Amino acid sequence: MARRTIRGGAVTLASQAAQFALTMGATVILARLLTPRDYGLIGMVTVVTGFLAMFKDIGLSQATVQRAELSHGQTSNLFWINVVVSAAIMLVTIALAPAIARFYGEPRLTLITIALSGGFLLGGLNVQHQALLRRQMRFGALAVAGVLSIAAGITTAIILAWRGASYWALVGQQLAAAAASTIAAWVLCGWRPSLPSRRTHVRDMLAFGGNVTGFNVVNYFARNGDNLLIGRVWGAGALGLYDKAYQLLLFPLSQINYPVAAVAVPALSRLAGEPDRYRAAFLRTLEKIVMLTLPLVMYLFMTSDWVVLVVLGPKWTEASRIFMWLAIAGFTQPVGNTTGWLFISQDRTRAMFHWGLIGSGTAIASIVVGLPWGAEGVAMAYALVGVLVRTPLNLWFVGRAGPVRTMDFYRAIAPFALAALCEGAAIFAYRRWAPPSSALIGLVVSFGIATVAAIAGMYATRGGRQAIRDVLQSLAHLNPTRAVAP
């Protein structure tokens, strides 16, 4: 299990690295071909379509991965449920298009919404195929599908933007990526559904999926209420700046969290009956996540103005302070994401839904408090409440039951928080006493400083040294013929 999990994680991380390179390259190009208003228009629609998209899955992909035993008939029934629900959501989205345009006072949103609705049906056709690949831990196939879909979407967007299609380039990107993902999943998975059968029962899986969907619904408002309110009160320009800053921060973090989650959830589900092994496996995974994300977020926080200038260009400089505040939320967000693995793999989805109500309430309250001060005010309030209130509550809530307790999180995080502080101090000293001649040079030099300082900070603690040794030992699973010193 350890060897298969580590190899799967390595394949998935390599895939995410390729997707990261493709997407960042496309971001640099598209940010210069398109305007903040173009991104803002799409952001207005995706607040609604993103909410509706949660229902095409209705938690059934997680049920497919989590169940110890699963028949072909059950999977087929789940497939047809996903398809019917996705088709219904597509029709609902088309019907809502005029209302969305009226809400924002932007007539162009009607056709944008109708065009994007086709992505729901495309996505519903591959939910179970993707879930089966994750269940079988076929991470190579998932990696290929992910890279192909990203490449198809990026190619479409750049061609359309180059030809002057403005915001339609971003619409084409989403539809092309969805189509490519579905085709790749069907080809690589090889599974084909049979006709639905009433004799095959999936009621308990629907209940499991219902709780997951309930959590996703309430959590969606916490993650997207900011976009909705900024777009409604401050308009497309402000939303474009905020949304692009959020994406620029979230994207590198998701390249770490998503592949690890894809491996961790099926692996932890198989260990749910062995508490000691389960706890050890989760904590080892958690410490590897914070080992990567805390230094990365500190680097982005300390160089926020340079990152925005180099990646997005001069016309996006107003987004730099928004990006800086959101980076504060980025310190704890990857840790909060791992709590979902515990809820799902332990079959505690009802508790997960209850936490969603609490966490979403605090997030929405922070957004409302910050809204009078514009996009930057929302970012500041969201970040501070997330770090000081929402994350501690989340860790307490999930640690009340199960093998992993609340203090386990803090013990795992502490060495890498210290390393990130050392890194931040080093970059601050560089910026204060040896400022660079350009933003690009500053980013390159700061990255080197950040790497050295973070590693030195990890070696300063016993937990950090043990985590580094653990990484080196894990590499033996990728190349068993090579010995790794203990």
Image (cartoon, rainbow, N blue to C red):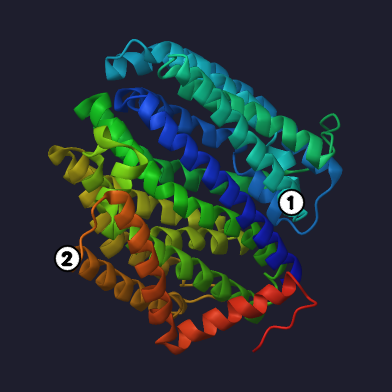
Identify the secondary structure beneath mark 2: helix
Asked whether residue 408 is in view, the answer is yes
**Label 1, residues with CA under 10 Å away: few <14, some 14-19, many ≥20:** some
Above or below 70: residue 68: below
Q: Quadrant of the C terminus?
A: bottom right
Q: Are marks 1 and 2 in contact (CB under 8 Å)?
A: no
Q: Which amino acid does label 1 sit on?
A: Gly
Q: What residue type is labelled 2?
A: Arg
- Give the left or right position of residue 478, taking residue 45 as reference: right
> Picture quarter containing residue 269?
bottom right
Residue labelled with disc 1? 140
- All told, the count of numbered labels is 2
Above or below 196: residue 370: below
Marking on residue 441: none
* Circle 1 or circle 2, nearest the eye: 2
Q: Could you tell me residue 468's position as x and y percent?
A: 54, 79
Q: Could you tell me residue 180's position as x and y percent?
A: 67, 30
Q: Which circle's residue, 1 or 2, is located before the other in the chain?
A: 1
Residue labelled with disc 2? 432
Identify the secondary structure beneath mark 1: helix
What residue is drawn where x is 29% and y is 19%? 104
What residue is drawn where x is 63% and y is 62%? 264
- Give the left or right position of residue 30, taking residue 186 as reference: left
**Label 2, residues with CA under 10 Å away: few <14, some 14-19, many ≥20:** few
What residue is drawn where x is 47% and y is 33%? 50
Q: Could you tell me residue 482's position as x and y percent?
A: 75, 79
Q: Mark 1 and mark 2: span between their CA atoms? A: 45 Å
Q: Could you tell me residue 100's position as x and y percent?
A: 37, 18
- Give the left or right position of residue 95, taking residue 282 as reference: left
